[in-house]
Structures are given as C-alpha cells and as structure tokens.
Amino acid sequence: MRMTYCLCVLGLSLTLLGCSSNDKHETGPKALTVPKKHQGSYPIKAVGTTGMVADLVRNVGGEHVEVHQLLGADIDPHVYKPTDKDTSRLAGADIIFYSGLHLEGKMSEMFERMASKNACIGVADLLDRKLLAKDEENAWDPHIWFDVALWSKAAGVVGEALALYDPANATTYKANLARYQKELDDLHGFVERRIAEIPEKHRVLITSHDAFRYFGRAYKIEVHGIQGISTDVEASVADITRLVNFIVERKVRAVFVETSVNPRNMDALIEGCAKKGHQVARGGTLFSDAMGEEGTPEGTYAGMIRHNVNTVVTALK
Ligand code: ZN
C-alpha cells in the first residue's frame, strides 16, 4: 500500500508520493513516497541532477550525505540524454533528487520508472502550484532557482525528504536546513538591493532562453528570451525579429548569453539590432541551467546567483 505523508514545511503544505509524471501541464503539486528507509552505511549515496539541485542536497544533507552531481558545468538539462554510466550511477544511488517540472526533459521518464523502487524526488514538482509560473503555452516553468525565496522552499522539500528517508538523522537535517535557509534569506536581500540599483527604464533582461521568468517576477526586472522555457524547440526567424524590434524600440543596452546554451541566436540578435542602427552590447555570460566549474565561486548556487546579478547590474546600470 502506498503511504501518503502530509507535511508542513515552512507553512507550505506538501503531499509526498512517487516521482513526477511526464506531464508539463499538471495542475496539482506532486507527491512523493520514500519506498524504503535508509538501512545501509553512511554517508548516504545521493545523486542530484543539476548543479543547483546537488548543491541543495549538499547543504541540507551535510556530513551524512555524499552527493554526486550528474550534469556538469555547461550541460543543458533540457536536452541531456543519460549515458550508460549515469544509468548505473542512478541505479546504485540510495536517494535521487532531480529538479522536476520537466526540466530534465529526456530523463523524466527514466525517473518515473525508477520511482517504484527508489527514493526519487522531483524537488520543484512538490512545491505549491500557487507559487509557480507558467509559460505562454500553459506549461509550468521549471527554472525556480532564480527566485532565491522560492529556492529556499525547495530546500525545505529536500529537508523533509531526507528526514523521511533517514529518520535517525532528521534533527540534523532540520538544523542544516534552518542554517542554509538563513543564508538564502541574506542572498535574496542582496539580489533585491542590487537589481534595484538599475534605473527602472533600463531594467530589461534579454537572454538566450526563457530561464529568468522567476528572477524577473521576484526582483522586478522585465525578462525576454529568444527561445522559450526549453531549449529543445529552436527559435524561429520571427522570434529573433520580434526581439530585435523590441530591443531597438526600448534602446536596451545589453544582452546576455548563457553558459549552457549555444550563443549563435544571440549573435543573430546583435547583428539584427546593428542593421537597424542600434548597438546593443554583449553584457556578459550568465549561468542559467548549469552552474560554474566545481571549485570556482560560480560552482556553488550562491556564487552563481551573485555572478549573474553582478554581471547584469554592471551591464545595465
Ligand atoms: Zn532552461
């Protein structure tokens, strides 16, 4: 029989049961069961898909959890196909955390298959839908990490899941969570203050794909991407022309490429603006769906957010 746990995390009601389904248009929050509790040795072997998710699990899991990050720097999760090595790594994991809301497009079905036997958690799938945004085609936007306050709620999901899987160390996970959420509160304040430094009329963020909707919503900056919320659909000439016209009309100062997305559309955009007599600058490179290299400041979630914010403010201020 499937057990359903009703949890209250930071005032957030979550029902946890099974991995996410493949439906981008789901109406309710997902739920998760942890089919078994931890019985083996420590540290617990966890796999996190993206750098952001792995970072979350590292912070909340602390010394009891060893985290393997599946997708390295610059890897685009929307189109990533798991290798045989990834599949065996996942099969050998005690617990799996993935971002969810269909971010890992090609891996979603695999996670679903694994859910019956493994603790397998789609972090964003468990958030209250009222907190989430949709795209123009009514699909849930998976890029929740760009609203730091929302990411803090995702940390709550990880904390509750670890506490369920490994009740013996629940107190430690809760303490780690509280400490990390305090750090995220400070980071959220930092982003708010820095973005507010950009004069309102210049507060426009143009990127390669629509990864910054939550960022725009949380920090009051208008956002536009050449491609939609997933990179698996190519931009059309019409998409580029539409944005060229927008940039020229609004006299946007700079545009930004992303480390995990091919810059060729951005080159076409800059060229299109130049043909219309508007020189738009390359504002720099942002981390969108992948963090920086391990061991660099941008190889952590907080470092990635700070890098992005400082890059954007410098170029647009
Ligand atoms: Zn994306």
Image: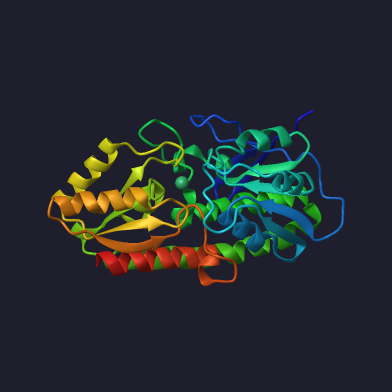
Residue 209 lies, with reference to residue 295, above or below; the image says above
The reply, left or right, for residue 80 in relation to residue 211 is right
Residue 117 lies, with reference to residue 264, above or below; the image says above
Report the colour scheme: rainbow
Residue 306, percent from left and from top: 44, 67
Residue drawn at 69 percent across, 57 percent down? 68
Residue 262, percent from left and from top: 42, 51
Residue 63, percent from left and from top: 74, 66
Residue drawn at 28 percent across, 37 percent down? 237
The reply, left or right, for residue 165 in relation to residue 131 is right
Residue drawn at 54 percent across, 52 percent down? 75
Camera-side residue of 10 and 82:
82
Q: Could you say which quadrant of the image residue 190 lies in? A: bottom left
Residue 184, percent from left and from top: 51, 63
Quarter of the image for the N terminus: give it. top right
The reply, left or right, for residue 138 in relation to residue 301 is left
Residue 189 visible at all = no
The reply, left or right, for residue 317 in relation to residue 112 is left
Residue 142 visible at all = yes
Count of numbered tags: 0
Camera-side residue of 253 and 174:
253
Camera-side residue of 25 and 60:
25
* Furthest residue in direction right, as rendered: 40
Residue 166 lies, with reference to residue 229, above or below; the image says below
Quarter of the image for the C terminus: give it. bottom left
